[in-house]
Image (cartoon, helix red, strand yellow):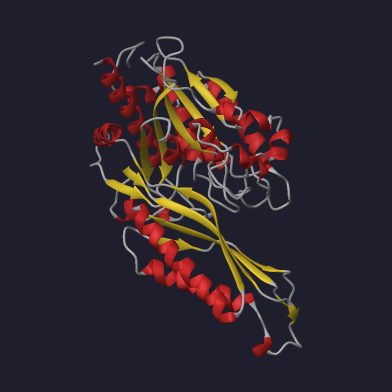
Amino acid sequence: MYGKGEPGRVAEAFEIGDFKPGVRAKTRCDLMGAPPYSEAEGMLVRRFLTSAHDEALKTLAFWMEEAGMSARRDHAGNLVGRYEGATLGAPALLVGSHIDSVRNGGRYDGALGVMLGIDVVEALARAGRRLPFAVEVIAFGDEEGSRFPASMTCSRAVAGTVDPSVMEMTDGDGVSLAQAFAAFALDPTRLEEAARKPGEVFAFLEAHIEQGPVLEAEGLALGVVTAIAAQKRLMVRFAGVAGHAGTTPMNLRKDPGPAAAEAILALERICSGGKDGLVGTVGRITALPGAFNVIPGAVEYSMDVRAEVAATRDAAVEAVTAEIHAIAARRGLEASVTLMQDLAASPCDPGLTALLEDAVAATGQAPRRLPSGAGHDAMVIADLCPTAMLFIRCEGGISHNPREAVTEADCALAATAMLHFIDQLERRERA
């Protein structure tokens, strides 16, 4: 085992007692898959600024302190644990992911990266190591956007790129983000104070399940992310005339339902013929007023378009938008397309990516580079500091689903790779 300040294979610290980093991280994710860490029985629902979120942060803070960190909540509702370096107040390597979930989601999406971060710090503490930099573990509160329309508000706050107008967003119950902040004992006027100052954080490492089938198909446990795809979130609305379902002839209707269906198929057609990993998704559809016997007066739906290249994504959005307006004109309807979120493609830092490749190789697995089609907090934190991402194989590539699954062995290997990455980073900082 390596002593205080001594660089080397910190993975040897794994052999202390029954402490099994990675394995324990998985166990803790499983524990947090049920109430009080979920808003509902029989499924995982942990949305931003809810009682389930609060319970998760309380337990995570306890685990952080138990691992040797100090823990605090910032002004955006993130939980931050800090393990000091050899010099008090040294710049930090930020490690972590998000703790919120989609409705009826999986237990490892986001949460595994937080738990792995805690395990990694405990391994350092048990080995008595203090590094030339601090290590901070962060649990972002709102990556999914499952409660409020825009996602990654918390990481934007940390990166210093958040727009204070987000406080005006409302959830499905009409509660504004400002009201939710106040109910969570946070001051909505201090959101921007969560921004980290230049030099406080010098790098970010996010470990996350792949949420895709590539690693499993190739028999690999770990992957090194090269870039995160560009994405746009939009809301589409077709407005017509509500009417009685039984008395309005088909040829006299201004029904937005079939128009929305036609436009959704256009999205599928345009994205299916694209390149650069272009994908388009409609995840939510609402017919208003939403009664069995009423022709809807309006139909609203979400549209998520992503590609590895922003120009490809934007061309698809432009083509779909043109079709939406053409469909509306042909059917005598009104249509609007509102941009809710625009995330640029985010390449991972080449230097950190190379270190992460070396770290994966040190575990005995050949490094595998791959892009991320899913959005992650790392793409926002890239505005603050250089970033790297480690992917962990998930069974069947299934995510955002209760069937989401990882193995203890893969989680342990991920923890080992993260510790090797820290070793590499320490050598670089001491050089």
> Vertical placement of 62 versus 3: above or below?
below
Depth order, front residue of 354/397: 354
- Provide residue 331's location: percent of width, then percent of height: 58, 80
- Provide residue 124's location: percent of width, then percent of height: 40, 20
Residue 154 figure quarter: top right
Depth order, front residue of 60/195: 195
- The reply to whether residue 223 is in sight is no
* Residue found 75% across the figure and 80% down from its top: 243
Task: Count the labels in the image.
Answer: 0
Residue 369 figure quarter: top left
> Vertical placement of 153 versus 20: above or below?
below
Depth order, front residue of 59/302: 302
Residue 424 figure quarter: top left
Where does the N terminus fall, quadrant-wise?
top left
Where does the C terminus fall, quadrant-wise?
top left
- The reply to whether residue 52 is in sight is yes
* Residue found 44% across the figure and 35% down from its top: 381
* Residue found 37% across the figure and 53% down from its top: 310
* Residue found 53% across the figure and 57% down from its top: 234
- Provide residue 136's location: percent of width, then percent of height: 47, 24
Depth order, front residue of 83/329: 329
- Provide residue 421's location: percent of width, then percent of height: 32, 29
Describe residue 277's horizontal placement relative to residue 266 as left or right: left
> Vertical placement of 225 versus 195: above or below?
below
